[in-house]
Image (spheres, rainbow, N blue to C red):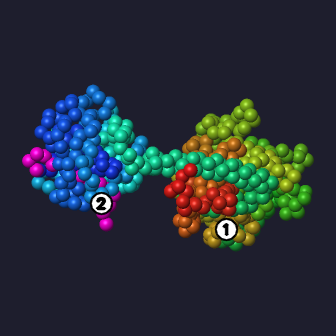
Amino acid sequence: MVSPLESSVVRIYSRSGLPIGAGFLVSDKYILTCAHVVADALGEGRETVEMPEGEVTLDFPILAPGQQFKARVIFWQPLNPQAKFEDIAGLELESKPPVTAQPAPLTIAKNLWGHQFKVMGFPEGQHNGAWAEGELRGRLANGWVQLEAVRQPGYRLEGGFSGAPVWDDRLQAVVGIAVAADIFRPEVKVAFIIPTASLVTAWSVPQYNLLPPSSDDRRFRFWKREVFSQLRTVLLASLVVTGMVLGVRQTGGLETYELKAFDLLMRSRPEEKPDPRLLVVTATEEDVAKYQFPLPDGILAQAIAKLKAYKPQTIALDIWRDVPREPGHAELVRELKQNENLIAVCSVGNPSDFNKPDIGTLVAVPEERLGFSDVVKDADNILRRQLLSMNIDKNAKCQADLSLSFQIALNYLHSAHKIEPTLTKDQQLKIGNTIFRRLQFYTGGYQQNEDNGQIFGGYQILLNYRAVTEVAEKVTLTELLNGEINPKQIKDKIVLIGVTAASAKDYHATPYSSGGTEFKEMPGVMVQAQMVSQILSAVLDGRSLIWVLPQWGEFLWIGSWSFIGGVLASRVHRRKILALSAVIAIAVLSLMCWVLLIWGGWMPLIPSVLVFVATGGSTIGFGLGKTSPNRLNRPN
């Protein structure tokens, strides 16, 4: 079957009977070609201004090879770089063309870059013709369009291709005629065409088989209008869905799921190295079996005395002691009174909780050496927050208004680095260059208010756990008392003493306590070590605290994922590909949240997934995700 291009191509002969160029049929009797091809065919000079009067010999090489036709010149625009149009000639056949000959379809397009083309010419030695192909490029200053024959090997456009129609495979039409090649750099295989717009403007007599002005451009304009219309609808849908999800979120409807997602990301983070400033002396199950439980005062006094000999910066006794435990009571009282590096612990009672009594100390301890061990847990009993301070009733046995961990950190920073805490203008705690922002309502996944029972009493911050296995170096109580330690493990360090034996029941659920991990709960003394390490690492090492976006930032983050879900659903129409794309997008979102949490950022993962899916689903439900089969082929 002969193609529209093949049924229109003509081969033009010189007076000696050799092919010298090409042209093509543009109507029943009119042919377009280059003026310099006609001048060569008639033996005229290429710069001839006057229209030649001789007859041009040609044939239709595909339809009727060898059947020669005569044509006369009726339009003439010779070579003239100063003219608006140049090197264009129009011929009129003196007889009818072959029956199967058809005028080539032409089209006008503003942007041809990257379009694949093909062209048939008659270079020297190829009287039967040769095909070249490549890619169209951009428009030049003189209105011509550059093209490149990119295949190797393959014909480049050279002498014999001039006047040939250049066929655009994407537009399925002729977009110009070959006019010149770069003869100075033949290795680059670059040539030039006169585009259709110049041809039909210069010679307007023929009834061209002209397709609607750039159907491709019209498709693009229609596509652009369609896309903008869809984007406006998707944007509106994403705003509505985002508003609904944020409304549910602020009532606390998503808090449980957000906290579980936070735990999952926290467990997935890589562990950090132990804090080199800390040492934890643990009373294990073997230790309490050896020394009894509760541990006698004398054992604690011996442990403190042993540590003091190695010159630690601070010693913290994370063991409640409000009644004597003989033997050794007097020795422990002496340490509590005289050891200025020793910090004791007490517990603030809760009248409504029988399991949380008010526990003081054996003797009065200065407030700078006393801290409460109380912690705040969420409704699911998981410890995600750190309590730094709180108001204390003047009649309470525990008169510490600072937490044990905070007191330890302040003591160390003052003694070792001369750093003191201050308050910013908006009453935020600042230590060194680090601001510890107080946990407020609507912070991250915490969205409930006082009416829902979620009250952020005291000065609370989020707890950025350092590690689950080894937050600090550990030695057992027996190893300490037997002298089985290296003095370097203690000198100038913070030493916490606490019970890790399961029988003591001083354990707390953490984000690491679920998800099939082996770390079901964390000993209280290790929790205190986590909290001390968080403060010191933030102040001295620049380690990030857990931070969240402001409310407007969370709205933008969540709204962006809502919009992405809608756009994806509106543009991807194959269900399997859409499902795969959605899975990949959610995986990317989760990965981003995980990476940001490594750097301390708690992003709203669950709301983002919800709006992504909901907006995508609503987009499909309202039909924006369906494509009419003819909408790109029949633009309005």
459 relative position to 34: left or right: right
Can you give x and y, in whole percent of width and height, for residue 488 in the image?
53, 52
80 relative position to 28: left or right: left
Queried whether the magenta region covers residue 325, the answer comes back as no
Pick whichever, 6 or 396, lies toward us: 6
- Which label lies toward us, 2 or 1? 2
Q: Distance between the residues labelled 2 and 1?
A: 83 Å
Can you give x and y, in whole percent of width and height, for residue 200 in the image?
36, 40
- Name which residue lies at 14% across and 36% down: 44
Q: Which amino acid does label 2 sit on?
A: Val
Can you give x and y, in whole percent of width and height, for residue 76 in the image?
26, 35
In the picture of the structure, the residue carrying the numbered disc 1 is 514
Pick whichever, 198 or 192, lies toward us: 198
Circle 2: element type: loop
Q: Quadrant of residue 347?
A: bottom right
Q: Which of the marked residues, 2 or 1, is nearer the chain's N terminus? A: 2
554 relative position to 378: left or right: left
Queried whether the magenta region covers residue 16, the answer comes back as yes
Identify the main secondary structure in magenta: loop
Q: What residue type is labelled 1?
A: Ser
Mark 1: few, some, or many residues within 10 Å (few <14, many ≥20)? some
Circle 1: element type: loop
Region in magenta: 1-17
In the picture of the structure, the residue carrying the numbered disc 2 is 99
- Name which residue lies at 77% across and 52% down: 247
Can you give x and y, in whole percent of width and height, for residue 401 in the image?
80, 45
- Name which residue lies at 14% across and 34% down: 45
Q: Are marks 2 and 1 in contact (CB under 8 Å)?
A: no
Pick whichever, 198 or 287, lies toward us: 198
Q: Please identify the quadrant where the N terminus is shown.
A: bottom left
